Image: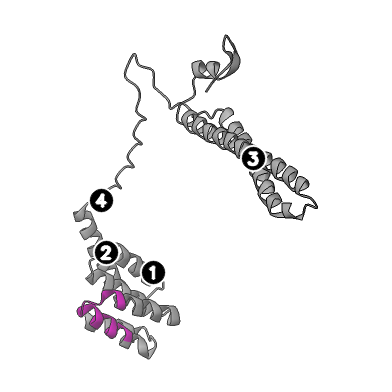
Amino acid sequence: MWAYVLGVALRLAAPPDVAEVAREAFELAADGRVGEARVRLAEAYDETHAPALLFVRGTFERDQDNCRLAIDYFERFLATEPATEDANRARTEVDACRELLDAAGPEPAPAPTPAPSPAPTAPSGQTPTTARPRRVSPWGPALVGTGATVTLVGGGLWLGATLGRRNAGDASTEGDYDARIRQLRGYHVAGIAVASVGLATAIAGGVVWIVTARKPASSTTAARTGCRPSLAGVTCAF
């Protein structure tokens, strides 16, 4: 086969390097480097467009049992109207390849794409349940904000009283000094008390915020949420 391929290349007056390219390709294939051989043949054909290389490539693919591609190369070779002997040899190769393809049968059809699985449905007589949205009581953030503000006010009173004691020594008389101390002591106590109330309010608001955020919203709980008059005065539910 290799000798005949070389003869075709010479009879078609192909460039001198075509026969060398064909020899290299078949030697690479013999060494198991089929991919490299195909690349070498493709590059040579792109450079020369020599009809002999179409016959060489068809013969190469025929040897690799790639008959469909071999038929394509041989038919392209026949389209160049080669000599009768070379044309007959190409037709013989095409017929042999088609016999092999007919014996192998049609190519297997691609596997059908599996249909998407249907969405799961609830058993008969049961209503599908959906996750209830979380609700956050407005009282939680409101209490946290109010408590933080009150705590800051109380802290301001305490800090002012503490700094005022340091400056009480500037009083001109002892009576004035005592009056300042009594006044600052009141501010000091009031600041601690106000800050304590604010801190407690903020903590309570945080607890309300967390507890209500963990409970799913429902029509009944929404109806009970809020503040309303009661016998004890005002009752708030969260």
Marks 1 and 4, how far apart in space?
Answer: 23 Å
Dot 2: within a 10 Å radius of its alpha carbon, few (fewer than 14), some, or many (20 or more) residues? Answer: many
Q: What's the distance in space between the residues labelled 4 and 2, CA to CA?
A: 13 Å
In this rendering, which labeled residue sits more in front, label 3 or label 1?
3
- The residue under the point 52% across, 35% down is 203
Question: What element does badge 4 sit on?
Answer: loop
Residue 69 is one of the magenta-drawn residues: no
Q: Secondary structure at mark 2?
A: helix
For the N terminus, the image quarter is: bottom left
Badge 4: how crowded within 10 Å, few (<14), some, or many (20+)? Answer: few
Amino acid identity at mark 2: Cys
Q: Does residue 170 sit above or below 19 in this rendering?
A: above
x and y percentages locating residue 33 in the rendered image: 25, 77
Residue type at the position of mark 1: Arg
Which badge, 1 or 2, comes first in the chain's sequence?
2
Q: Position of residue 45 (x, y in %)?
A: 40, 78
Label 4 to label 3: alpha-carbon separation: 94 Å
Secondary structure state at the residue bearing disc 3: helix
Residues under numbered marks 1 and 2 in contact, where contact means CB atoms less than 8 Å apart: no
First in sequence: mark 3 vs mark 2: 2
In the picture, measured across the screen, residue 182 lies left or right of residue 19, that is right
Q: Which residue is mark 2?
A: 67
Residue 27 lies in the magenta stretch: yes
Closer to viewer: mark 3 or mark 2 = 3
Q: The magenta stretch spans which residues?
A: 21-36
* Residue at screen point 78% across, 46% down: 176
Residue at image x 20%, y 80%?
Answer: 31
Q: Residue furthest front?
A: 174
Q: Which residue is mark 1?
A: 76
Q: Which residue is mark 4?
A: 106
The spot of residue 111 in percent (x, y) is 29, 45
